[in-house]
Amino acid sequence: MAGFKAFLMRGNVIDLAVAVVIGAAFTNIVNSVVKGVINPLVGAFGTQDLDSYQSCLKGPCEVDDAGNAISGIPIMWGTVLSAVLSFLITAAVVYFLMVLPMAKVLAKRAAHDKAKEGVQETLEVSELEVLKEIRDHLVSQRGPSTGTGSGTGGGAGSGGGLGKHPTS
């Protein structure tokens, strides 16, 4: 039971459920647009009902009032055309109202994150440059070193404590 509960509480399962519900509601909108706008536009060139477009494959097609074929083999290409139009409208709305704006938002976010990383790298580089300048300044105060020793000896240029400021 714990595994099943964990499965149900995962974010993507809930997101999928919401998407199915929204998709079902959106289907009603698309069907209304097809029946209320697309079919009348097609009706201006033929009949208003796309489902009535058909061709007869064999013999004279006769259909009763219920739409059942009595004789012949009708090919209902108007129904297919209506489904294709519904799909294209749905795909266009999803793309232009959801996918495209989300892609633009994600691209802006990626550019912002990249710029932020560039600023961070610049800060790290400038911090490194400041540390190098501090090192060079300290080396120049101490004087040129004469060897590769530990630097604790009183060799030439070390000053031996004479003439140095007490705080250095």
Image (cartoon, helix red, strand yellow):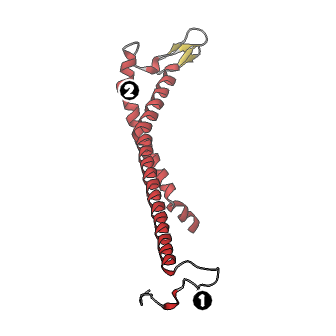
From what the image shows, is residue 19 above or below residue 149? above
From this view, report whether residue 105 is shown above or below residue 70. below
Q: Quadrant of residue 58?
A: top right
Going by the numbered disc 2, the residue's amino acid type is Lys
Q: Which residue is mark 2?
A: 35
**Who is closer to the viewer here, 44 or 113?**
113
- In the rendered structure, are the residues bearing label 2 and label 1 in contact, judged by CB atoms less than 8 Å apart? no
Give amino acid for label 1. Answer: Gly
Image mark for residue 153: 1
* Quadrant (top left, top right, bottom left, bottom right) of the N terminus: bottom right
Tell me the CA gap for discs 2 and 1. 96 Å
Q: Residues within 10 Å of mark 1 (few under 14, many from 20)?
A: few
Q: Position of residue 93 (x, y in %)?
A: 41, 35
Q: Quadrant of the C terminus?
A: bottom left
In the picture, measured across the screen, residue 35 lies left or right of residue 69, that is left
Residue depicted at x 52% and y 79% = 143
Camera-nearest residue between 73 and 109: 109
Q: Can residue 80 be seen?
A: yes
Q: Looking at this rendering, what residue extends furthest in the top direction?
A: 60
Crowding at mark 2 (Cα within 10 Å: few <14, some 14-19, many 20+): some
Asked if residue 65 shows in the view, the reply is no
Query: Can you give x and y, in whole percent of width and height, for residue 40 in the image?
Result: 36, 20
Label 1: element kind: loop
Front tag of 2 and 1: 1
What is the x, y in percent for residue 14? 47, 55
